[in-house]
Amino acid sequence: MSVKVMLADDHVMMREGIRQLLEFDGSIEVVDEANDGEECIERLKVSKPQVLLLDINMPKKNGVEVLEAIKKLKLNVKVLILTVHKEVEYLIKAVDIGVDGYILKDSESAELKKAINTIMEGETYITPELIPAFNNRLMARDADKDKIDLLTSRELEVLIQVANGMFNKEIADTLKISERTVKNHIANIFKKIEVSDRTQAAVFAIKNDIIKLF
């Protein structure tokens, strides 16, 4: 029995190429396609594929938002992200949400089919090229979590304001504390998270989802 797959990518030629690669030997059947994130979610409910090949960069809802919706709606489908993004932060985010696999668009067709078969067996597949950076980032994130745990609730509030680009006086006015107190909090924050300036503190906050860019 062939594996039923749905393709979600806003480039028609990309979908056509992937369809041809997947259906070549008859072990995989592409049962549906979607051109954007919202259409993807609606088509999933109708087509009920076993595997969704999901691009990250799509209109209306991006791949991460689609993955979040799939988990929220509890749709019974394995999700394999197929993307050009080699930045490990995308992979980390997808894994945190619960993706089943992550593969790059420049991978060979044999690897794509291997990824599909792997997640169908209940295992996670990550393209080998990204595994070293992924493991390093996980270890770094564990270390960052220990640093975050050292921060008081007030220090977290101040860090958020710093990461949002606010000056000391603005932070003081927002939190209804003195500028001197703000300066003391910032000094303690820098020491605990091991950074030396506001830019590094902002990067730390963004990297660890203390604030969101969007």
Image (cartoon, helix red, strand yellow):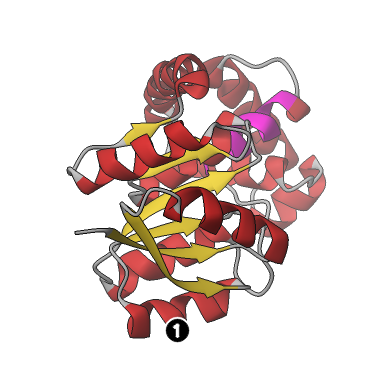
Instruction: Identify the image quadrant of the C terminus.
Output: bottom right
User: Is 121 situated above or below 129?
Assistant: below
Say which of 157 and 18 sits in front.
Answer: 18
Quadrant in the picture for residue 45: bottom left
- Residue at the image position 66 percent from the left and 40 percent from the top: 84
User: Is 64 situated above or below 59?
Assistant: above
**Magenta region, mostly helix, strand or loop?**
helix
Say which of 171 and 2 sits in front.
Answer: 2
Position of 99 compared to 20: left or right?
left
Outermost front residue = 25
- Residue at the image position 23 percent from the left and 48 percent from the top: 120
The residue wearing badge 1 is: 42
Position of 207 compared to 71: left or right?
right
User: Is 73 situated above or below 177?
Assistant: below
Mark 1 belongs to which amino acid? Answer: Glu
Quadrant in the picture for residue 29: bottom left
Where residue 27 sits in the image (x, y, percent)?
31, 51
Say which of 30 and 67 sits in front.
Answer: 30
Where residue 165 sits in the image (x, y, percent)?
79, 45
User: What are the residue bounds of the magenta stretch?
Assistant: 200-209
Q: Is any part of residue 11 visible from this angle?
A: no
- Residue at the image position 19 percent from the left and 59 percent from the top: 1
